[in-house]
Amino acid sequence: VNKRVHRHDELVTVPASAIFRMSSPHLSTRSKRLLQFLRSDEYHPANPRETVHTFTEMAMVLMSEKLDPDSHWAAYLDMLPEPSCPAFFSKDELTELQNPVISFLRMTFMDAPLVNFQTLMLDDNFLARFPDLKRDARPGVFLWSIATILQRSHTWEEVIMIPFVDLFNHGGKHATSYYITHPHPSKYA
């Protein structure tokens, strides 16, 4: 088909069920329980600012899904390359850049959520509810979650990740492919 594509034309529709988000019906039971705890009065984040708290929630849920080999999202999360972003620059490297925006972003989206994570990992109430996270959750996995969100999220009604979009947005060691089926393949050969 030779159809000219115009600005704002809809090219692809991704169903809501194929989007990683906090309201996804495909989150594991542990992740749903984790969100419930993080949104309860029992949780008192070290940094309660709304932006930091929301980001901490998503990073905790993404980490929970990453650590679950039976997660609905496992195939997607396993294919993602290791992230690389200014959030992982050392303080000396950030100072060398002399960029207050990057320093602010690091403080808001890495340092503050990391303090919330570390506080949770010392909270007896949290650890009693999530003993498997006590065993498996490590700062490196949490930082992976933060960097993955920073590099792969989109803002819609909430912060989301769209696995289909990542087919076009990464390189690395994993090969991706896709095919389109059509009722009349001979017309498009």
Image (spheres, helix red, strand yellow):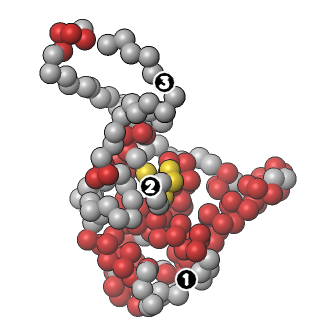
Work out which quarter of the rendered image holds the N terminus and state it.
top left
Label 2 crowding class (10 Å Cα cut-off): few <14, some 14-19, many 20+? some
**Residue under pointer 2:** 160
Relative to 55, is 124 on the left or the right? left
Q: Which residue type carries mark 2?
A: Ile
- Which mark sits nearer the N-terminus, 3 or 1? 3
- Which mark sits nearer the N-terminus, 2 or 3? 3
Q: Nearer the viewer, mark 3 or mark 1?
A: 3
The residue sitting at 32% across, 77% down in the picture is: 33
Residue 112 x/y as whole percent: 63, 72
**Residue under pointer 3:** 6
- Asked if the residues shown at circle 3 and circle 1 are in contact, with their CB atoms under 8 angstroms apart, the answer is no
Q: CA distance from mark 2 to mark 1?
A: 22 Å
**Residue farthest left in this picture:** 183
Relative to 167, is 155 on the left or the right? right
Q: Which residue type carries mark 3?
A: His
Q: CA distance from mark 2 to mark 3?
A: 26 Å
Q: Nearer the viewer, mark 2 or mark 1?
A: 2
Label 1 crowding class (10 Å Cα cut-off): few <14, some 14-19, many 20+? some
Q: CA distance from mark 3 to mark 1?
A: 46 Å
Q: Kindly identify which numbered label has been placed on residue 76.
A: none
**Residue under pointer 1:** 45
- Which mark sits nearer the N-terminus, 2 or 1? 1
The residue sitting at 45% across, 21% down in the picture is: 5
Q: Nearer the viewer, residue 144 or 179?
A: 179
- Asked if the residues shown at circle 2 and circle 3 are in contact, with their CB atoms under 8 angstroms apart, the answer is no
Q: To which quarter of the image does residue 185 belong?
A: top left
Label 3 crowding class (10 Å Cα cut-off): few <14, some 14-19, many 20+? few
Helix, strand or loop status at disc 3: loop
The residue sitting at 36% across, 34% down in the picture is: 12
- Asked if the residues shown at circle 2 and circle 1 are in contact, with their CB atoms under 8 angstroms apart, the answer is no
